[in-house]
Image (cartoon, rainbow, N blue to C red):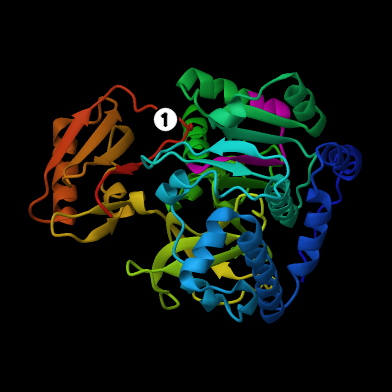
Amino acid sequence: MAEAAPTPGLYTRLASGLLFPLQERVKKHHSVARRRELERTQWLGPGEIADLQLSRLRDFLVRAGRDVPYFGRLYAEHGFDPASLSSLADLARLPFLDKPRIRAHVEDLKSRSAGPLVKYNTGGSSGEPLVFYMGMGRVSHDVAAKWRATRWWGVDIGDPEVVLWGSPVELGRQDRYRAIRDRLFRSYLLPAFQMSEAQMDGYCREIRRIAPRMVFGYASAVALLARHARLRGHRLDDLGVRVVFTTGETLYPDQRAVIEPVFGAPVANGYGSRDAGFIAHQCPSGSLHVSAEDIVVELVGADGCPVAPGESGEIVVTHLATNDFPFIRYRTGDVAVASGARCPCGRGLPVLDEVQGRSTDFIRTASGNQMHALALIYEVRDKPGVRSFKFIQDEDLSLELLLAGGPELTAEVEAQIRSGLLKRMGPGTVLGIRRVDEIPPEKSGKYRYVVSRAPG
């Protein structure tokens, strides 16, 4: 059953019903029609959605084999006939697509029938930046998928929103057109690069002035701002914020726990990336729904085989709206768990029980075991005087902890942190702790707890 949504204001109805569709028509995007279709198909039963997905997958693969040189050769090498696809399991007959393979074949991955292509790149936070291309279909899907998810929470285009973001792509496009467009749709960008205490004081004042219905941004940046607001006594929970969307990185439980009371609104986690697209969004019932009409998700183990329900596996994505530059069995490097349970909200869309983070969010112990970064974060985050921190693991498995803090961060507290970390990591651990004045964000504007260069 659909959730009851607040009646949108007059300006919101004008923006979402007239101004935004007009913009999309000028851009030759079909996001409006796609969003309407997604809002219809989300209420189909799981079996009906699976049938729809399989049919769309078959057509997508046929087109890729016909129009994309790389996949034409790949199908021939593996004796793969996409027209005979009878189940999602048949996809496993194709090898994975990964960043090195894309870099090696970037021109041959462009469709011969592609329309205008836009060049994109990832930030390379994992050490592997990637250049790829998007066509109109992919952009329209991403817009429609995000739009559908915001409407789950009673927020629409034209409702005031604050965006705490830091991607160089977005910040490099602050031209006159963008400024006018953002003003029309009441979207206000607060750069996540600039998160000094003075800057965050200003952000809190700006948020009070805007009184947004939605806050959207990196989990780490929004949590950092929430902690600052709480510490400085900036009240943000009386503004009428309906939802805080976090995306772009792992949302940790302690981040959710600080964001929700400060903003007086629930956090809706979104999972996706620039290269793989908007993959899943959280509904008000708490489930992380996969946009299965356009995205096929496989969870695979270290051996490349599917994992059992309830087990963690790497997320492999086939994006059905990437005809112009296909992403087929693309290894994301992210780790998730799915049980197959259905959400009580009534949507038939499949659910990811948990997105545990990137493979680089895991630390490898000297004995060879993998440990989620949360196990280490718990030993640091609540210690007296700790303002911010970051773990860096090198290829030789040595671990360095950067600590920024105040006078309460004494030598005794540091010794407690060291003892707790070594106990969790086990014998043979090489651990260094370095005090720093400040831990800057990544180039993307994210504040990462963990950077691992350990071999996979």
Left or right of residue 357, residue 345 in this image: right
Left or right of residue 365, residue 7 in this image: right
Q: Position of residue 316 (x, y in %)?
A: 48, 62
Quarter of the figure with residue 148: bottom right
Q: Position of residue 392 (x, y in %)?
A: 26, 39
**Residue lying at 68% horizontally and 73% vertically, measured from the top left:** 348
In terms of secondary structure, where does tag 1 sit? loop
Quarter of the figure with residue 152: bottom right
Residue lying at the far left of the rendered structure: 428
Q: Which residue is mark 1?
A: 441
Query: Image quadrant for the C terminus?
Result: bottom left
In this view, 15 is above or below 191: below
Q: How many marks?
A: 1
Q: Position of residue 159 (x, y in %)?
A: 78, 39
What span is colored magenta in the figure?
Answer: 206-219
**Residue lying at 82% horizontally and 52% vertically, measured from the top left:** 6
Q: Is residue 210 magenta?
A: yes
Q: Nearer the viewer, residue 225 or 130?
A: 130
**Residue lying at 75% horizontally and 29% vertically, measured from the top left:** 182
